Image (cartoon, coloured by chain):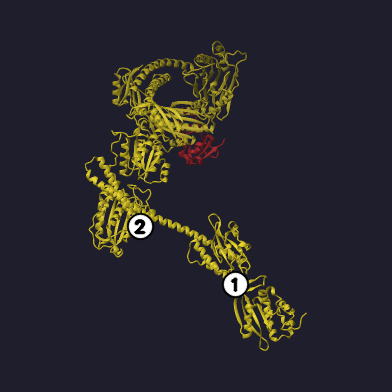
Chain colours: A yellow, B red
Amino acid sequence: MTAPGTEVFAADPEVGADLAAVDWAATPVGPPDGWPQSLRTAVSILLASRFPMWMAWGPELTFFCNGAYRRDTLGRKYPWALGRPANEVWAEIWGDIGPRIETVLTTGRATWDEALLLFLERSGYQEETYHTFSYSPLRDDDGALVGMLCVVSEDTDRVIGERRMATLRDLGSDPSAVRTEQEMLTFVGGQLGRNLHDLPFTLIYLRDDDGNARLAGSAGIPPGHPAAASAVWPATVLTTGEPVHVAFDGPAFGDLPAGAWPAPPTHAVVAPLLQQGDAPCGFLVAALNRYRPLDDGYRGFIDLVAGYVAAGIASARSYQSQQRRAEELAQLDRAKTAFFSNISHEFRTPLTLIMGPVEELRTRLTDADPQVREELEAIHRNGLRLGKLVNTLLDFSRIEAGRMRTRYRPVDLAATTAELASVFRSAVERAGLTFEVDCRPLPEPVYVDPSMWEKVILNLLSNALKFTFDGGVRVAVAAADGHAVVTVSDSGVGVPEHEIPRLFERFHRIENARARSNEGSGIGLALVKELVDLHGGTIAAESTAGRGTTFTIRLPFGRAHLPAEAVATTAQPTAVSAGVDPFVQEALRWLPDGSDGADEPDGSDGRPASTGAPARILVADDNADMRSYLARLLRSAGHRVTVVPDGQAALEAARADVPDLVVSDVMMPRLDGLQLVAALRGDTRTAGTPVLLLSARAGQEASIEGLEAGADDYLFKPFSAAELLARVRANVELARLRTHHARWRTALVDSLQEAFFVCDDSGAVIEINPTFTEILGYGPEGLPYAPTHPWWPDPRADPDGYRQVADAFGGLLERRRGTDTIPVVHRDGHRLWAALSFNQVDDPETGRFAIVGTFRDVTAERYAVQRDSALAALSLRLSRADNVTDALRGALAELRELWQATSALAVVFDRPTPTVIGTEPGPDWDGLPEAYRRAVAAARERPLLTPVSEPKDGVAITLEHPDGTMVLHVEPRAGRPFTDHDETLLALLAGHLTQGLRRAHQLDRQREIALTLQRAILGPAELPAGFAVRYAPAARPLQVGGDWYDTVELADGRIGIVVGDCVGHGLEAATVMGQLRSACRALLLQNSSPAGTLTALDRFAARLPGAVSATVFCGVLDPASGHLTYSSAGHPPAVVARADGRTDVLDLAQSRPLAIPRRAERPEAEYTVPGRATLVLYTDGLVERRGRSIVDGIGRAADAVQRGRATPVEELATSVMERLTPAEGFHDDVALLLYRHPGPLELEFPAESGQLAVTRTALRGWLSRAGIDRMTAQNVLVAVGEACANAIEHGHRHTAGNIRLSASATADDLRLTVADSGRWKIPENEGNTHRGRGILLMRAMMHQISITKGAAGTTVDMRARIT
Amino acid sequence: MTPPLTLTSSRRPDGVAVLAAAGEIDLSNARTFASALAGAVSDDGPLLVDLTGVEYLDSAGLAALLPHVARIRIVVGELLAPVITIAGLTDITTVDGR
């Protein structure tokens, strides 16, 4: 298919193919194979180039193009355009390009066009395009101009992008920062109107307050155009916030402006004007360039325009509101300044009119009534104060307005300052402060306005005095660094560091600073600074809180720094002006001087009460004039007024005496009004007191603050006298109504016959009634009475009383209710008894509790009870006494306890030397102090039963003792008064004692007889060696009962042992027992067989009433061998506790109790008691316990004996009884008999060596009986032998005498004692030889050895442990 | 009363001199024992003091033995062993275990 010559198109296969397909023969250029070389070359260059190109050749300018041109420009005209005449191909723009081509072909010069707008129709519509191109001539082989080559680049994107960018840039190039909304819209309109290409017309709509869109700006379209009506645009954009694409369709769009284009737009975009965080504030209608597609770039452009408009509107609006606010503030400031200025002026006029006449009156009324004078002075002082305040305000407003008239004159600043300071001297010194003025002459004058300087210095001094309480104030002037330096220092409260920067700020007041007065406006220091500034100077403050403050002013010398027109070169004589007076007057009023109405009479004193019942009113105000005014006013209404200068004083006064009403200023030093209210409300006594606050701070907030703090009412200064009185009356009446029930209660309480009190939860007594005061002497003036209360007994003089009260008081706080009788001390010192009853009550408001109590004086009843109980106690003591001495001792103990006496003694004049009896062993008659003996002897002469009381010596009373006259002497403890009551009681008790002693004396004698008899029937007075017994009768005071024990030494050396138990106990059983015992003893002596003895006793008992069923254990013991024969008549078996810890029960010969008829013979058994074993006989009282088996009891008894088997038998008896005695005592008689085998060895022999062998023999035998082995026995023999030899050789070397040897055994050891009656004198030279060796032997053989040497002889105690 | 004390002087077949005591020696008869000892001791050779028959010997008896320790040998029964031990005579004493 390749036509000849088409190889020329080979450079681009695609376009080349299309070119080849052209019917070139039909064109003026002819078929390709006939083309001249120049054409071929041009075509091949064209096709090979990547740059868009087209060319025209030949007479018809036949069209060629390459692939790049086809893509960028030709569009839909390809491939139709190939081979066609150029004017046909680019017919639509031929008007533009034809002439250019013509020029090229005629002149041969190339053309250059940059960014030429061409409306191409390559995409189906007229499209705005921009191209940069060059036409260059093409010549044929002959050099003739036959065509042209066009090299093109399309710039459409660049051109349109730059155009849009320019619009956005212009919109953002607003030179002014912010403007009004309208200005901003106008500007926007202007800018948008400059780009009618992209925005043929625009409309800006803003949402008005109703939410409707309102046309606010436009560009490219007159505002009156139908399309500008807001209704034609979709208002949904305001709610959705999304842009809408709108086609112009409808009558409103009939005649639209075309903008920069020949034809009007067909579409628009409606874009919202978005605001951050809010609904759109409007929308922008942007008509669209109909020659461009609405692509992303175009949409983005419109969005940015809308964004700019929205931001501009927002910033304009915010600017406007700020502007408005600033202007309002400025307006306010101007108004304020004007107001101050005006009002100050307005004040000055009436002030002048007040002060003039007041001055006049002061001079005219010098002799007037003091109250008139006082009131006049108050008017004058306060007029001055007000004037000063007004002047200060006026100065400010002048400075503010720049209207301060200054006249700087050369002044001797040191002298002037010193003079100004001097007027404060009296005030400072009256405040008790030091005042130092150190003003050194300056080298040259300083230019100041004298009246201003005066204010500077006076303000600083007044300030210093106000805040200084200790130390002093110092003013100094000196020159430094070309400046005059003026310092005002004080040692006052100082300024906290964080407050210093604000010190000179107007109206700034340092809160909570302690000051002499709370008065002040906070402008003094601000004014000082302004004034110093006017002088071109500086002021600085240095301060340490609590240490003081120093203000330093530096003024330049010379006048160069001052405005020339305000400087006067002539000096003026300085004189302290009238302006200082208000400062000094004011300062003086801060100082205490008494004249504040405090000592004026109350209205109740003669003056008629105007309305209502007079009330007691406490007035607190730091301003003396106000205090005095209030006092006068309230007194005139008949009230009783107390005045105090601050809240703290008010609080103290109110607590001391609760007023009916408190009238208090709010701003006060120490404790302000609000704090005072809080403190009063926090105290139960003052919680209900109404408080009326007065304040200069008007406004709802202030009063709410006051009422919240608990104030009852609030009154603003200034107030009229009538208003104050009305409020006072209302509050007093309201409080009275409110406290009606409280007063009723008070009346009720006051009328009580009993003392009444209320304690708070700390125990402090906070309320009492008159009876309380009557009984204790303490009145309401001392309330509250904090514990320890003054009526408590003295802890040293009366510790018991103190403790009793302390205990009762503890109960008061801990228990809900209770009663107590306690000793208390009246204010005058006398002691009384109070019967107290109390109840705790909860206070529902505070959640705390209070104690309400009442008490009666029960002193008289108490003494009656005391007397009765003392008598009862004495009777009891006497009844328990076994004899006269016991009775007396008991009585003395009772007396001593009763009077808490240091001593109670009885002296019985029974012999030439009287017998002294005390509660405990003490000195005898001769050991008593002489004075004491004399006093007692004197008392003996007094009538019986008449107490003699000596203040220092105690009290004595004489009574009859069975053995003679007796003096009873009681010495009460120091501080314990011995009252009439006490004397009566003592006499009564002494009488009682006399009878008691007589009765005891009789009883004594009877008892002695009875005891002798009882002992006679009980048992042997002396026991054989090795025995121990215990006896406990169940019935007291008898010392015998139905049980018995007995040991009978028989003729053959054996010992009969008997333990028996008759039925019952008490006296009856004892008589039976006595007879049985005697019978048994006699029978044993006749018949040494236990069974035989018991058989014989059966017959005896059968005839003796009460003896039937008695039980008896009877045994016969050989103490040498330990052999025992025994028989039991119904008696519990004997027990043997062996040394090896085992127990044997001797129950092999049990049979019936006595006199129970049986045929059987009484049995008899035998037993050998081993060495160091303990035989135990007892009656059932020892082992019987209710509800427990007797076998258990026997086991317990055996155990008790086993536990004590290593102790001597006497100790063992004690420990067994202790172990077995039940807690409540024995219910039955108990007899216990113990025998340890062998019984102890007791030898006494002359101290001669010849006795040693005999002694050894005896000891050897005893050791054998005790079951001691041969080796141990040998050791004992040697040790005892050596001890005896020592006694012979040393103790009795020169004198005759006896040696005593004793040996006893326990289960575990042997105890041996060798005692002589001589003194061992061991010669030095023999000490180390065989006697020394003797002691060595003793120590080696024994486990323990001690040698006791005494006047009566030497005793060697030895112990040998038995292993 | 003086405790029983029998003192027998003899010579064994091997020529050793023997002083045999039987009974008890205490303060009361120690002198007798001492004299017997003094008589029996000689420089010719050691004396054998036979105390196996002595049931009791106290410090006085020991005192009689001590001056002669260099020239005597002692034989005792078990009963006397503790006393001899305490007196420090063990090196010249034989305890007869009979």
Residue extending furthest toward the top: A1103
In the picture shown, does residue A831 fall above or below A211?
above
Looking at this view, is A521 or A1019 the one in front? Answer: A521
Image position, residue A840 (x, y; %) = 45, 31
The answer to whether residue A1296 is seen in the rendering is no
Looking at this view, is A361 or A616 the one in front? Answer: A361
Q: Is residue A119 left or right of residue A858?
A: right
Q: Is residue A692 left or right of residue A1231?
A: left
Crowding at mark 1 (Cα within 10 Å: few <14, some 14-19, many 20+) = few
Image position, residue A1227 (x, y; %) = 52, 21
In the picture shown, does residue A20 fall above or below A1223?
below
In the picture shown, does residue A327 fall above or below A1246?
below
Tag 2 and tag 1, C-beta contact below 8 Å: no
Q: Amino acid at mark 1?
A: Arg
Q: Is residue A1046 left or right of residue A663?
A: right
The answer to whether residue A1085 is seen in the rendering is yes
The kind of secondary structure element at disc 1 is: helix
In the picture shown, does residue A808 fall above or below A1061?
below
Residue that mark 1 sits on: A158
* Residue A572 - label: none
Image position, residue A1104 (x, y; %) = 54, 11
* Residue A400 - label: 2
Q: CA distance from mark 2 to mark 1?
A: 62 Å
Image position, residue A34 (x, y; %) = 73, 86
Quarter of the image for the C terminus of chain A: give it: top right
Q: Amino acid at mark 2?
A: Glu
How many numbered circles are shown?
2
The kind of secondary structure element at disc 2 is: helix
Q: Disc 1 is attached to a residue of which chain? A: A
Q: Disc 2 is attached to a residue of which chain? A: A
Residue at image location 42% in from the left, 43% down from the top? A704
